[in-house]
Image (tube, grey):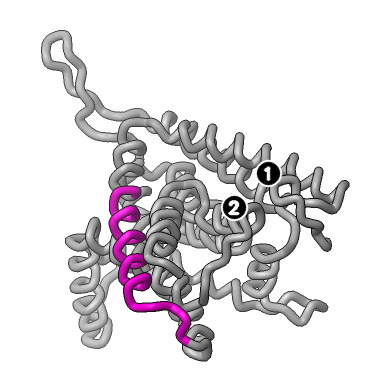
Amino acid sequence: MTVLQAIIQGIIQGATEFLPVSSSGHLSLAQHFMNVQLPSLLFDVILHLGTLVAVLIVYYKLVGRLICEFIFMIGDIFTGKFKWSKMNPDRRMVIMLIIGLIPLFLLFLPIPGTGMKIKNFADKLATDSGIVVEGCSLIMTAILLSLGIIASKKTPARYTIHGNRKTVKSEGGRRQFNVVDAITVGITQCFAAVFPGLSRSGSTLSAGLMRGINRQTALDYSFVIGIPSILAAAVLELKDAVNEPMTIGIAPIIAGIISSAIVGFLAIKLLKWMVTTNKLHVFVAYTFILGAIVIILGIIEHSTGVNPITGMAINF
């Protein structure tokens, strides 16, 4: 792999990991139509670590506070000082993040009669010969984003009046998650992990909005809960990656992690701006149109047995 190829892969990973367009769906489609393959699991881990760096740079203050609060909370639990009714906002966020991550363990449940776990089924969907699932999942992303936008408009903001000028004083919606909110977002994230094309950031953000959470809080929660999710995915892949021969040079590795971190940082900033300025409909249109095109191409492939882009035969 050349440095330029590594940079391109880093750009794709950094942009699609955080924008609500699905990194897994775009990776699957790129592999299908352009015959692009990551050179190894190790490089995939590197790209995930780059995007993890991006989140930590943007949210370092919040993450630092949450880590400190988690340590204090453990101390209070062991000394009997912990009280659910007297949690501060950071401690509540820590608890809600833990609860929100619990549904991810569903991925390791066995599917009766198949000999597979749900995670294995997800891997199979991402690597199969067809693309109809990706198309349907992209449209589902568009639907979820639409529902989130509609829900956010039903929680009116508070305004202040200065003469003839009206300005937003605060966004509508709740600023704190409860247990049901956290479980809802966690289950949504679990579904996003199964279906390639269903955006993790888009679906978790939409779930928060549909639960009546205000836009900024829902977005922050979506990004922060993604930190352990991205880290866990990297660790699971690293177990298999260490058994592979080292086929990538140091320069492409450095280029990949830097490009994914920089683009990931910019993608987070862009999404934060688009959420606060009510421009999520752009992603609704993009994922719906792309999903419809992919479904049509997938149906053509199933009927002809040929990839319409590459002209190669497909074995379903």
Residue 266 in magenta? Answer: yes
On the picture, is 199 further left or further right than 154?
A: right
Q: Residues within 10 Å of mark 2 (few under 14, many from 20)?
A: many
Of 242 and 125, nearer the camera is: 242
Q: Residue at x 36, y 56 (%)?
A: 223
On the picture, is 268 further left or further right than 128?
A: left
Q: Give the prevailing secondary structure in the magenta stretch.
A: helix
Q: Which residue is mark 1?
A: 294
Query: What type is the residue that disc 1 sits on?
Result: Val
Query: What type is the residue that disc 2 sits on?
Result: Gly
Where residue 150 sits: x, y (%)?
Answer: 49, 32
Measure the C-alpha gap from mark 2 to mark 1: 11 Å
Q: Residue at x 87, y 48 (%)?
A: 304
Q: Residues within 10 Å of mark 1 (few under 14, many from 20)?
A: many
Q: Residue at x 80, y 45 (%)?
A: 299
On the picture, is 314 further left or further right than 215?
A: right
Residue sticking out furthest to the front: 2
Residue 4 in magenta? Answer: no
Where residue 250 sits: x, y (%)?
Answer: 33, 78
Which part of the image, by quadrant, shows the C terminus?
Answer: bottom right
What secondary structure is found at the residue carrying circle 2?
loop
Residue 101 sits above or below residue 115 on the image: above
Q: Is residue 216 visible?
A: yes
Q: Which residue is mark 2?
A: 197
Residue sticking out furthest to the bottom: 243
Where residue 228 sits: x, y (%)?
Answer: 39, 70
Residue sticking out furthest to the right: 303
What secondary structure is found at the residue carrying circle 1?
helix
Q: CB under 8 Å between callouts 2 and 1?
A: yes
Q: Earlier in the sequence, mark 2 or mark 1?
A: 2
| Highlighted range, magenta | 246-267
On the picture, is 223 further left or further right than 296?
A: left
